[in-house]
Amino acid sequence: MSLVLASRSAARVALLADAGVVVVADAADLDERAAEAAIAGAAPGAVAAHLAAAKAAAVARRHPGALVIGADQTLDLDGERFDKAASVAMAAAQLARLRGRTHRLSSAVAVVRDGVVLWDHVGEARLTMRPFSEAFLAGYVAACGEELTATVGGYRLEGRGVQLFDTIDGDHFTILGLPLLPLLGFLRTVGAIDT
């Protein structure tokens, strides 16, 4: 059964590959802000679920019969949703706002075949950043540079970003942007991977 990942995320491709799941990566090139307009005011998890399904549906048009996996992640701080920062300076400002506070990540995954959503799931995690110093923030931003704009929140937990946190409550894969265990379970139920 053909599996396609509607993403150019190296982290998501690596998570699947490390789990032994072979996928073809084909990014959706979806205008996410326009897609979000259809569900303005929705909860962060609902936004992530909508975008995951929209990405998968867009790519499914190019891969008839394939199972297409779409994923998206949102960050919520006390009711305010953060997007990926457009610049390193904006990422630094976001990190300063997250410092010493708890935020919530919602990671959604959807599987679509021929335009039909067969399954979806939203996982959530709560992360508390430590009250790091301005000197630490400056050093972190200098060390990470442009990679800060590649992720919502400006951090990669699997790298230097782990130093930003005091506590983390939630599934590791959800934090990395793909609720992998529920996805693997679904793929087994439809015979896409071995049981």
Image: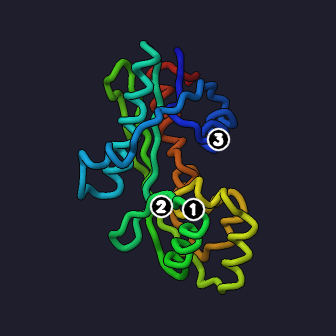
Pointer 1 with pointer 3, Cβ within 8 A: no
Q: Secondary structure at mark 3?
A: helix
Q: Label for residue 43?
A: none
Circle 1 is placed at which residue position? 87
Residue where numbered disc 3 is placed: 10
Q: Nearer the viewer, residue 32 or 173?
A: 32
Q: Residue at x 50, y 57 (%)?
A: 84
Amino acid type of the residue that numbered disc 1 sits on in the rendered structure: Ser
Q: Secondary structure at mark 1?
A: loop
User: Label 2 belongs to which residue?
Assistant: 125
Number of the front mark, 1 or 2: 1
For mark 3, does the 10 Å Cα neighbourhood hold few (<14), some (14 to 19), or many (20 or more) residues? few
N-terminal-most mark, 2 or 3: 3
Q: Where is residue 87 drawn, in percent x and y?
A: 57, 62
User: Residue drawn 38% across and 64% down?
Assistant: 81
Task: Name the residue located 42 percent from the left edge and 31 percent from the top edge.
Answer: 56
Amino acid type, label 2: Ala
- Whichever of labels 1 and 3 marks the residue nearer the N terminus, that label is 3
Marks 1 and 3, Cα distance to the nearest angstrom? Answer: 20 Å
